[in-house]
Amino acid sequence: MIIHDVKVHPEADRLPREGQLAWKIASVAADPVAVEPAVIDMIINRIIDNASVAIAAINRGPVTSARGQALAHPRDGGATVFGAPHGVRVHAEWAAWANGTAVRELDYHDTFLAADYSHPGDNIPPILATAQQLGKNGHDLIRGLATGYEIQVNLVRSICLHAHKIDHVAHLGPSAAAGIGTMLGLDAEVIYQAVQQALHVTTSTRQSRKGEISSWKAFAPSHAGKLAIEAVDRAMRGEGAPSPIYEGEDSVIAWMLDGKTAHYQVPLPAPGEAKRAILDTYTKEHSAEYQSQALIDLSFKMGKLVSNWDDVAEVVIETSHHTHYVIGTGANDPQKMDPTASRETLDHSIMYIVAVALQDGEWHHVRSYAPERAARPDTVRLWHKIRTVEDHAWTERYHSTDPNVKAFGGRVTIVMNDGTKHTDEMAVANAHILGATPWQRADYVRKFRTLTDGIIDTAEAERFLALVARLPELSAEELLGLTIALPEGTLAASKPGLF
């Protein structure tokens, strides 16, 4: 890896493009390096994972709305839409919008956490949709996805957005644009302009993940993916972009991030170096914010120690800065303690999540968020006894670059009314690459079958799994099969809109 120094330059410096981060990203994207077998295997896993959670959410409101908008933009030779019949084709950017929303709705796919947050599987819908519309094959798609993951993960390693209340999809626009550029074999000049355009139009505030969290949380990454496709289209037609988008005097860094004294060190592969960043990412076994995954597993274990929840005086979670201030009591969001809060809010409340996991010993993507479950009186009483505190040791582990030290969990202490204390801790979730039961292909397939059971026909499930397993050898025609159709008459229709 090469570590690139990134900082703001005054216009008088006339920073050459070769010194700009967007050009360096484009150079990585244009590098024709081969994709390693382990990376190909993990890409297949993540396509399966995305399909699992998309179908589980297929008739939920936001997904239905996004699909309705997409279906209003038909195109012969376009891209496919999850849930729709196999012959249906729409414009690629609208397929990315519909499919990206379906993937993101349940907050249940892959993750990478470092200086910032990300769900790098959000790269898959826009890159796949573009591949289908432009007749690319499985090999091409693999190359594009390897780049999308590589760029997003390395931006997330090095540039913090959330400290400035910028939503993490600002790293997704550039990564998706770069991945599309790789897949299409575009030259560095075109990718450079597309990356800059994509960043320029995908910066938004984190209010989408604060307070009363709405369905926009599901739409935000699909919006970034849609805009990335449009940015590539403009760049291919010869259009330029605001430049330098990262380092300029009035750039994203200068006015939205650390300002004119900023100094970031961004790692990117050297020329000829394989793109392996996807192997550092991890998926979710449980449908909740990633920073809750280890604490859910720990709660399953600790819940067995308590027989009467009204005997609990308090529950204290010592954890990282991020967990405390984003999904813990440090966020100071009263909605996180509200039994009538939206599902989107509840899955960003570690207090609620731990309360239910302690009591139920399981986590289910529907049952655990049901309004009647959230309103259960004994759960509400326990929920309101849970608080988080930042422990600097857990914060240091969260930010560690050593994978053997890095952790996303915490220490939980259950204090009983009689003074008895039960304390335990967990660093990483069981399914994590360093966890007790790190996930393999069979786990992804099991998740797929579990989440799609009763929604799609068994034959359709098996067809999809057999096809995706052959990804490296798929023809352009076969790549159109990387979608899933619901049985006739079971796909919900959206309310009417403008389109």
Image: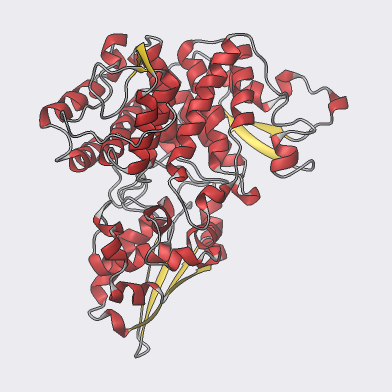
Say above or below: 81 vs 326.
above
Residue 120: quadrant of the picture: top left
Q: Is residue 490 left or right of residue 435?
A: left
**In percent of the image, x 41 and y 10: which residue is there?**
134
Residue 59: quadrant of the picture: top left
Q: Nearer the viewer, residue 419 or 259?
A: 259
Residue 238: quadrant of the picture: top right
Quadrant assignment for the C terminus: top left
Say above or below: 249 vs 436.
above
**In percent of the image, x 50 and y 21: which residue is there?**
229
Q: Is residue 87 left or right of residue 425?
A: left
Quadrant assignment for the N terminus: top right
Residue 39 visible in rendering:
yes
**In percent of the image, x 55 and y 66: which residue is there?**
332
Q: Nearer the viewer, residue 310 or 497?
A: 497
User: How many badges with numbers are in the image?
Assistant: 0
Q: Is residue 404 left or right of residue 48?
A: right
Residue 273 visible in rendering:
no
Q: Residue furthest right?
A: 12
Q: Is residue 228 left or right of residue 35?
A: right
Residue 29, given in percent of the width and then of the height, sits at 54, 19
Residue 367, given in percent of the width and then of the height, sits at 24, 57
Say above or below: 437 vs 102.
below
Residue 172, given in percent of the width and then of the height, sits at 52, 33
Residue 398, given in percent of the width and then of the height, sits at 51, 54
**In percent of the image, x 56 and y 43: which residue is there?**
167
Say above or below: 117 vs 31.
below
Colour mapping: secondary structure
